[in-house]
Amino acid sequence: MKEILENAEEIFTPGTVLAEIARKYLREGASEKTVKARLQTISSASNIADLDVETAMEAARCHSELVDGARNLRLDTPSLFDAVVLGTGRILKSKIVTGDEHFRNLPETIWIGAKPRS
C-alpha cells in the first residue's frame, strides 16, 4: 500500500474516514493524543474531501448499489460511511485503495485485501 500512495498524483481522504479511524482507535483503547496524532498524519499526507451536496447525492446512489452487492455476496450490510467513500471516489474520479469486501469487485477499487480462498 505504501508504494501505491507514494506513486499517487494526489491522495484524498473523505472527512468521514477520519471519524471512522478515530472511532476504531478509541474503541481499541488508544489515547486521544495518539488518535489525534494519527489523524494529523493522515490529514498532512492527503487532501480531506468534504461531504458536499453533490457527494451526498452520489453517496446515496452508491449505498443502494453497495447494499445490492453485499446481498449478492452474502456480506453484512455496508455502512453509509462506505457509500460516502465510494461516492467521493466517483465524484473525484479516483481509485479507492481498500481491503473492505464491499468494494472488492468495483472498477474504482485497488484491492489490498486477502486473496480469495481457492
Image (cartoon, helix red, strand yellow):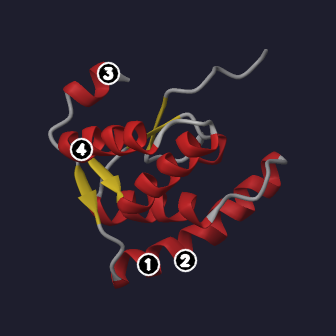
Circle 3: element type: helix
Residues under numbered marks 1 and 4 in contact, where contact means CB atoms less than 8 Å apart: no
Q: Residue 82: where, in percent of width, then height?
A: 56, 57
Ranked by sequence position, the earlier of labels 3 and 4 is 3
User: 10 Å neighbourhood of mark 2: few (<14), some, or many (≥20)?
Assistant: some
Ranked by sequence position, the earlier of labels 1 and 4 is 4
Determine the image quadrant of residue 100. Answer: top right
Q: Give the residue pinned by disc 4.
A: 11
Circle 4: element type: loop
Horizontally, residue 7 falls left or right of residue 87, namely left
Give residue 60's mark. Answer: 2
**Going 56% across and 34% down the picture, which residue do you hit?**
99
Q: Give the residue pinned by disc 3.
A: 2
Answer above or below: position of 60 versus 42.
below
Answer above or below: position of 14 versus 32.
below
Residues under numbered marks 4 and 2 in contact, where contact means CB atoms less than 8 Å apart: no
- Give, as a three-letter code, the residue at label 4: Ile
Residues under numbered marks 2 and 1 in contact, where contact means CB atoms less than 8 Å apart: yes
Give residue 56's mark. Answer: 1
Horizontally, residue 78 falls left or right of residue 97, namely right
Q: CA distance from mark 3 to mark 2?
A: 30 Å
- Give, as a three-letter code, the residue at label 1: Ala
